[in-house]
Image: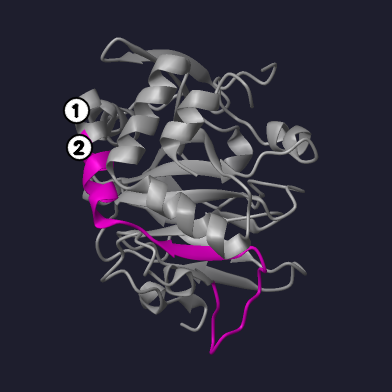
Amino acid sequence: WTVSDYLNTLHVITDDTVFDTKQVNTNNFSGDDDDNNDDIIKPMSWGGGNRISKNMYHVALPKALLQELRTYANDMGITDFYRGLIIDGPSYNPGQEKSVTFQQQNWMVHRPKSHWKSNMHWLSPADETAHDDYLTILSSGGFDQVLDSIGAYFNLDSLSAYHLSFIGVSQCERGFIHTDVNDSGVMAFNLIIPLMLVEGEGPELEILSDDETTTRYYQYEYNVASMIGDGALHATASCDYMSKGEMRLCATVYVGDITATNVRNLLMSLTQAYPPVGN
């Protein structure tokens, strides 16, 4: 399940309410065969093992991945672009999207509609060149090891990193509860990888239970990804970093074992320009 394999096949396929991420062992992750996937991937739980959302997990990441993604975002001009967009302003209008260029590569930036009640913006590759460049950075940071661990943990046949983006936010009045992946057969997930966090602030992710009766909160941590699977209800937690002149920046990577059975459902969750839905 390597990023390189995906590049070769791209044209063929398309309080106790606060979770403690210290349950994940991030100290010795290498991705080698000797690593225990049960230590690398764990279900999110609260209050002594209470799981309110059966398809919410957290994943230890290779430490090289954070540095590779940060350096990439800085060198491409993406970090400065976000600072101008959500700290200095002005932000895009809710629902607005626009084509932008970084280092002669085509990207698409999009701000969700007003019911999201935040200034979050998504930035995604808009064509094959930008998409493949992002994949090579993931590979350089050891993301192949993450794919191997996820594949072994869920007993999957293959995995592709098929939906890539950066997300940035500095203010959220109230999060919009939504899902990222549906009806994949527990074969696809969105990994949220923190790149810049605001020190001293509260949890960043709001999680609604599967029965929609209980809310819990998850605190992001460097070198740990939150992994969101089928039907997992969540939202950006309320925040306001504007007075500090700071922002939160994350990379997001959707991975999936794409099959004839689930491909149509996965296509329905795409929110970016590339890969094109028609392909």
* Vertical placement of residue 166 versus 194, above or below: above
Q: Residue furthest right?
A: 261
Q: Residue at x 40, y 46 (%)?
A: 144
Mark 2 crowdedness (10 Å alpha carbons): few <14, some 14-19, many ≥20:
some
CB within 8 Å, label 1 to label 2: yes
Q: SS for tag 1?
A: helix
Q: Quadrant of residue 79?
A: top left
Residue 22 rendering spot, x and y as whole percentages = 36, 77
How are the colours assigned in the image? Answer: one colour
Magenta span: 44-71
The circle drawn on residue 75 is 1
**Crowding at mark 1 (Cα within 10 Å: few <14, some 14-19, many 20+):** few
Q: CA distance from mark 1 to mark 2?
A: 6 Å
Residue drawn at 30 percent across, 56 percent down: 62
Quarter of the view holding residue 21: bottom left
The C terminus, quarter of image: top right
- In the depicted view, which residue is nearer to us: 98 or 254? 254
Camera-nearest residue between 84 and 180: 180
Q: Amino acid at mark 1?
A: Asp
Q: Is residue 238 magenta?
A: no
Amino acid type, callout 2: Thr
Residue at 60% x, 32% y: name it: 113
Residue receiving disc 2: 71
Instruction: Residue 138: give x, y in percent of width and height.
Output: 35, 39
